[in-house]
Amino acid sequence: MAAKYIAAGLLGSFAISYVCDHFISEKKIFGGTTPHTVSDKDWWQATDKKFQAWPRTAGPPVVMNPISRQNFIVKDIES
């Protein structure tokens, strides 16, 4: 019985958040405009072309967690 209230509450909160997001970001109820860098396709293509033209240089691969990559040798206490 509690599951239906939880599911209904979750669905309701998702619906409310979607409506709020739509009106705030798409309808711009608080004012403002969409930046030209987002709305202008020519600007987007030129920027992408510039980033793809940069020379890419990299060093050797880096291990993110070197401790987990070590091979620990466990010795017996007797030896």
Image (spheres, rainbow, N blue to C red):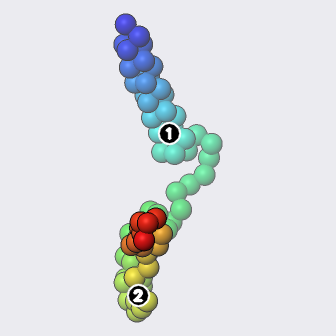
Q: Is 24 rendered above or below residue 57?
A: above
Residue to which mark 2 is pinned = 60
Q: Nearer the viewer, residue 23 or 71?
A: 71
Position of residue 45 measured from the top left corner of the image (x, y, whole percent): 37, 76
Q: CA distance from mark 1 to mark 2?
A: 43 Å
What label does residue 21 carry, if any?
1
Q: For the point 37% across and 14% down, which residue is it? A: 3
Q: Residues within 10 Å of mark 1 (few under 14, many from 20)?
A: few
Q: Nearer the viewer, residue 30 or 6?
A: 6
Amino acid type at circle 2 is Pro
Q: For the point 47% across and 73% down, which residue is it? A: 66
Kind of element beneath mark 1: helix
Kind of element beneath mark 2: loop
Instruction: Give the image quarter of residue 54.
Output: bottom left
Q: Is 27 rendered above or below residue 76?
A: above
Q: Quadrant of the N terminus?
A: top left
Instruction: Give the image quarter of residue 9.
Output: top left
